[in-house]
Amino acid sequence: MAETTMTAGSPLDARPDGLQGVVADWSSDQRAFKNVSWGKAMMWIFLLSDTFIFGCFLLSYMTARMSTRVPWPNASEVFALHIGGANVPLILIAIMTFVLISSSGTMAMAVMFGYRRDRRKTAALMLLTAVLGATFVGMQAFEWTKLISEGVRPWGNPWGAAQFGSSFFMITGFHGTHVTIGVIFLIIVARKVWRGDYDTGARGFFTSRRGNYESIEIMGLYWHFVDLVWVFIFAFFYLW
Amino acid sequence: MVDITQSGAEHVPPAEVGEVDLYHPHSWWTKYVFSQDAKVIAIQYSGTAIAIGMVALVLSWLMRLQLGFPGTFDFITPEAYYQFITMHGMIMVVYLLTALFLGGFGNYLIPLMVGARDMVFPYVNMLSYWIYLLAVLVLVASFFAPGGPTGAGWTLYPPQAIMTGTPGGQDAGIVLMLVSLALFIIGFTMGGLNYVVTVLQGRTRGMTLMRMPLTVWGIFTATVMALLAFPALFVACIMMLFDRLLGTSFFMPSIVEAGEQLAYGGGSPILFQHLFWFFGHPEVYIVALPAFGIVSDLISTHARKNIFGYRMMVWAIVGIGALSFIVWAHHMYVSGMHPYFGFFFATTTLIIAVPTAIKVYNWVLTLWRGDIHLTIPMLFALAFIVTFVNGGLTGLFLGNVVVDVPLSDTMFVVAHFHMVMGVAPILVIFGAIYHWYPKMTGRLLDETLGRFHFWVTFVGAYLIFFPMHYVGLMGVPRRYSELGDMSLLTDSAHSLNAFISIMAFIVGFAQLVFLFNLIWSIRHGKDAGPNPWRATSLEWQTAETPPTHGNFGKELPVVYRWAYDYSVPGAKEDFIPQNEPGTYPAARGH
């Protein structure tokens, strides 16, 4: 948002550090977070709210898992692939995790090149991030297909507690939806970067506001969050 | 008071951001229907909320018909009664109170009171309303669905919510209810993010957080809470939808229905209760905190006196908001829990009484030796204080485990929560509408009709809900469509029930007078001028009344003082607007 950038040479440059700085910022006028734009503030608060959603999902899953009286299927066996005559536990999940974490790296690079106004590299890196995200969703679809073909359903599975399948489809599905939405927005923002919308000040189709290169960083916040959530899902669902 | 700038403009920091890139509508559609202006969105939110609230009012009449005169009305079957009770509760709590306080008052007042041109993201704000409207339409659709709306009670407890015996349990009712709630939460999140960011990052020059009117503090804190509490309800809705549609067993234990073993098994109904009340208890304060804030401003303005203990009022709002997240299981004492948990939740529940009591004392001390004008907003504000105290006192009974267990599921509980989160916030809503209507339309609401509306509503609400406490103590259970010949009930319980029903009708009809007043006064009300209450906060200082697009004309106001400079000694007038520069005339510090 162009209108929320800092005014150069304002007295804010001389504000105190540390805890005193926090107090000074919060007791000042106009803005509580001095160098944070509206878009970034909104994304952070949204992510906080979204954290509560995933937190509730994971806590519910843990409650179900701990209170069930039927054995819980063994994740390393269920999520193993048969490769070269041996069952390799969690191999697909490991690759998926690697892909998603890598996409966080490419996203961070896109943010850096964005601030350097290097349109082509930025757009290319965002598209690469989108491709990695789509690969992740694709592998998730493969995993779902495999489990479904082995008889896992939301209401039951061959190996134990029915809540295994329910939680699995619900949590990975909800996370996969987040990744998919992220991929769509990555493509939209990458297209804007490529066309140079943020240099010419073209107005958004829906909001009719001018964007700027900070959109890439805001997009990145969301993307890193989705990655971070995956780390928790990985730890609590697959490794437990 | 460090909050008050003692000298003139030179101490106000320069603007940190340039002018906002506002969307300027060109057609009637983008100006009044798909509007991105927070003021129009506020009126859309309020209109929709009041309209669906009228449905809930009619449902309460139908319930009272049945309770007061059992067996007289054939069309109110036990199933229909459950549907009325469920929809009445859900509409009132979520679709009326939450939407009206945050979507209605929040949208109208936050930008005007903090000196912003609009919400920070007007387009998202507009989407928020349309998704809310969609949620309301889905809710209304369930009345026309086969089997009718759900009759699970507003708490929607599984397993009964999705079983055959409950109306709508195996029909579309419960599905539409859950979908509607999920939509509401998505829509609310869009608006809520806007309100929070506008307050944190979109204030005008000189407007520090500690100079904001308490109305903004109340709405702001409630919105933050809603953003953290609604996720639990969202997750609960999704999981129950899966239980109902996909046959998962998140909340469903092994269960036998009509001699037949259902396919469910291994789920935990208590898990739903935890998720629901982790939302449900903060929800009480999501409704109450905006009311606290608004009533503080009404009292200060109409008593011509600064609010007593402004800082404590702010911290009490924030403290109540934080505490309300660790009390939820007091709704579950009879669900069975470890005694130590009961002890913990009873303790936290009673601790909330401390900041709440601070607020009540401060309201009373604001009134003390004030120049009290008994205007209609003031009457409603005074009625709120009394009602909130009365409703809060019965909360002390219900917060204690040993007292709660026998009272649980009786009419006593119904009376308690209607007083504290039904009547009390609605009194504030009325007061706020009488107070801000002149800013929204330029005209005052009719005084005579207003006084009639106030006295019938206020006295009538007590005549409805005070006997209900007694009826509850006698042992009349809630959620029973008919009491039959219970030997434990005296005749007085039955005749009181009839009395309550008649009063409910009278109070309900008084609201039609209010609606008439709302519409009639748009054209025929007395001209209000820009600042009829001679109030200090920024919304009364706008160039035009009603404020136009962009709120403040060419220049945004600069704020030099807090919002409560009433009756300052030596000042020309008995109020000094927030945007008036200069020192205080009389010597301070004595």
Image (spheres, coloured by chain):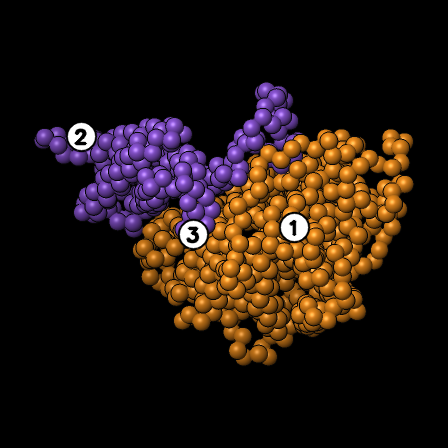
Q: Which element carries disc 1, helix, strand or loop?
A: loop
Q: Report how far apart the C-alphas of labels 2 and 3 lie in the structure.
A: 48 Å
Q: Is residue B419 visible?
A: no
Label located before the other in sequence (2 or 3) = 2
Mark 2 crowd level (few <14, some 14–19, many ≥20, 10 Å Cα): some
- What's the residue at 74%, 37% (across, down)? B560
Chain orange in the figure, letter: B
> Label 2, on which residue?
A88
> Which chain does tag 1 point to?
B
Secondary structure under tag 3 reads loop
Using the image as rendered, state which of residue B589 and residue B467 is in the foreground: B589
> Can you give x and y, in whole percent of width and height, for residue B356 in the image?
70, 43
Q: Residue furthest top?
A: A17
Residue at 69 percent across and 36 percent down: it is B206
Q: Amino acid at mark 1?
A: Gly
Marks 3 and 1: same chain? no
Marks 1 and 2, Cα distance to the nearest angstrom? 69 Å
Q: x and y percent of residue A102 in the render?
A: 29, 29
Q: Name the residue tied to disc 1.
A: B553
Q: Where is mark 3, residue-wise?
A: A206
Query: Residue B529 or B466: which is nearer the viewer?
Result: B529
Can residue B425 be spotted in the picture?
yes
Up the image or down, B284 lies above or below B72; here it is above
Chain ID for label 2? A
